[in-house]
Image: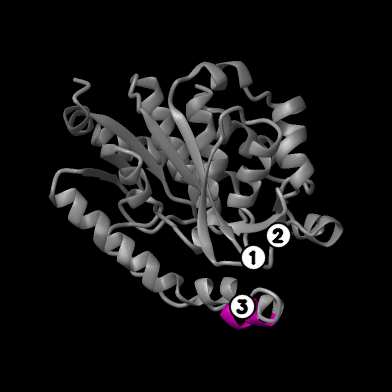
Amino acid sequence: MKFGLVMEGGAMRGLFTAGVTDLLMENGIVFDESVGVSAGACFGCNYKSGQNGRAIRYNLRFHDEKRYCSWSSYFRTGDVFGAEFCYHTIPEKLDLFDFDTYDSNPMSFYVVATDINTGKAVYHNCRTAKGDDIEWIRASASMPLASRIVRIGGREFLDGGISDSIPLRFMESIGCERNVVILTQPRGYVKAQSRILSLVKLRYGRKYPELVRAFAERPKMYNDELHYISSAEKAGRAFVIAPPEKLPIGHIEHDTDKLLEVYRTGRNTARASLAELRRFLGQE
């Protein structure tokens, strides 16, 4: 039996996921496959590199750094989350990413990006976390309007959450019979239409109509995925870890107390379900 880990995005709500995965790492929980979307990709790669605490550490260190996350970065570079600083300066110079451990870990790590010409999800196995793999992670987390389009191999991509926010079906399609799903919204959440849909139409509608269609249909896709996850959970194929209530954090957050609160909520939620999770995975 193969076990998978699914990590939803949600910008800085992803620190909930970081708290969960750090607690799981500390307790020796392992998976055969994993997939991250958006923030789930950016923070989730640390699971494969075995770097417990890295995500919260660099977020606390750089939360006020304009090159990391700011409207100043957006006006200078086209990205709210500065691409060069986030995806190269930090992991290569300031808070080193453990590429060797990443390479030696047998767990696969996939990320989801949206092909903006087709509006469809693309799933990429990040085998080395170097070269184009970094661009795939960046593409997965590149929010429309707040990021530049990411070009890889002649194709154009943006945020994976537009086309597949919680890719449980994908994990099942590659043979994972039981999957742990980390959500960043509480149970009972229902996604409504985005308030920025009109701006997305204005910005991308003429050249990328399929992206706009996917963005407009995202609430239905997302809510259908939640329904599917609930069914899988009842059938014993999925184990869901979700915040107990709405997380008190914005897409862009500079308040260290809120960053820590969300991270600690992830740790506490995972700790409370650890015994049940071990039974689900057969890792008692």
What amino acid is at disc 2?
Ser
Q: Do the residues labelled 2 and 1 touch (CB within 8 Å)?
A: yes
What amino acid is at disc 3?
Pro
Q: Are marks 2 and 3 in contact (CB under 8 Å)?
A: no
Q: Observer-nearest residue: 50 or 177? A: 177
Residue 276 relative to residue 133: left or right: left
What amino acid is at disc 1?
Pro
Compared to residue 206, the image places residue 224 above or below, namely above
Q: Quadrant of the C terminus?
A: top left
Please check the rendered image and state whether residue 15 is part of the magenta-colored stretch, yes or no. no
> Few, some or many C-alpha atoms within 10 Å of disc 3 (few <14, some 14-19, many ≥20)?
some
Residue bearing mark 2: 147
Residue 184 relative to residue 10: left or right: left
Residue bearing mark 1: 144
Residue bearing mark 3: 209
Please identify, in this view, whether the residue under mark 2 or under mark 3 is nearer the observer: 3
Compared to residue 227, the image places residue 211 above or below, namely below
The residue depicted at 30 percent of the width and 60 percent of the height is 226
Residue 112 relative to residue 239: left or right: right
